[in-house]
Amino acid sequence: MAWVEAAGVFYLRRLVDRIEPYQPNPLPVAGDIGGAELVREAATLVMLFTVGWLAGRTGRSRFGYFVAAFGVWDIFYYVFLIPMTGWPRSVLDWDILFLIPLPWWGPVLAPVMIAVLMIVGGVVLAFNDERDAPPLWPAKWSLWLSGLGVVLALYVFMADAISAVRRGASIQTMLPVTFNWPLFLVAWVLMALPAVELLRQCLAQRQAIRNPQDGRRRSTDMHHAKNPATARGRMVSMVYMAMGALTGKHGTTAAKARSVQRDNLDCAPQKRRD
């Protein structure tokens, strides 16, 4: 699919003499090509979604495969353009990324960075959902912050087009001057949060599977920490130990502290064993 995309873009750019997008009049009007290009972009998204739907078995895995396929397709689109056109010559070359609702401009490196996040998050989500393990999903806070990152990234990509619309200038002849890398990096970090959260959950699952004893020990420690009786016992024993340190009677106070801990553990509610 990436080769088909690169070939289609090569044909269109050769037709309008715009192999390199960053030049005067970067979006020349050539009959009905503009409308056909918009439909082609939408059809490409449908094909990528179909790939994810066929590859996965659940809603999560299908979404994961779709996101990962989108990232791979986006990166290899540029890889295949190089032997076809000799462009891009650098990851900092400007490119027109999308046309809806306004032209998106950015260096080639920017969409590649986003594609890497999509591959990592999509692969972790899809592969974990295919295994016999609890399903993974990013925490709500990471999704909200990621959404904010998407909005910021869209603004960075369309900032020059938005400025041209405000000035009443033509967006078809507009060329960007600078790319707001600081704001884009903030947006990229926010967009990376769901992928990082998925990786954290996946590693925690694998650690729990490899060391079940550690998982049970942590569960027991959390139970005692939340139990009021054992918590009070620890506090009283700590008081006895402090008194022993002050008075010099370490042996007597330590024995009292251990006695208090045993009494509170005996009084703590135990799980019923049938």
Image: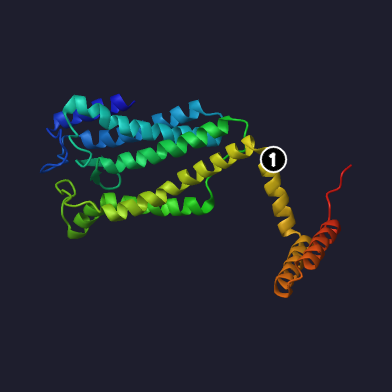
Residue 259 x, y percent position in the rendering: 83, 62
Residue located at (64% from left, 38% from top): 211
Residue toward you, 159 or 208: 208
Residue 7 x, y percent position in the rendering: 24, 25
Residue toward you, 83 or 258: 258
Q: Is residue 66 visible?
A: yes
Q: How many marks?
A: 1
What's the colour scheme?
Answer: rainbow
Q: Is residue 63 visible?
A: no
Three-letter residue code for mark 1 = Gln
Where, by quadrant of the figure, is residue 201 drawn? top right
Residue toward you, 204 or 44: 204
Residue that extends furthest to the bottom in the rendered view of this protein: 247
Residue located at (25% from left, 54% from top): 180
- Tell me the residue that label 1 is attached to: 213
Q: Is residue 84 left or right of residue 222?
A: left
Residue 170 vs 209, above or below: the answer is below
Residue that extends furthest to the left in the rendered view of this protein: 24
Location of the N terminus (image quadrant): top left
Residue 26 x, y percent position in the rendering: 15, 41
Residue toward you, 98 or 192: 192
Q: Is residue 240 left or right of residue 134?
A: right
Residue 143 vs 54, above or below: the answer is below
Where, by quadrant of the figure, is residue 225 drawn? bottom right
Asked which secondary structure carries label 1, the reply is helix
Q: Is residue 262 left or right of residue 127?
A: right
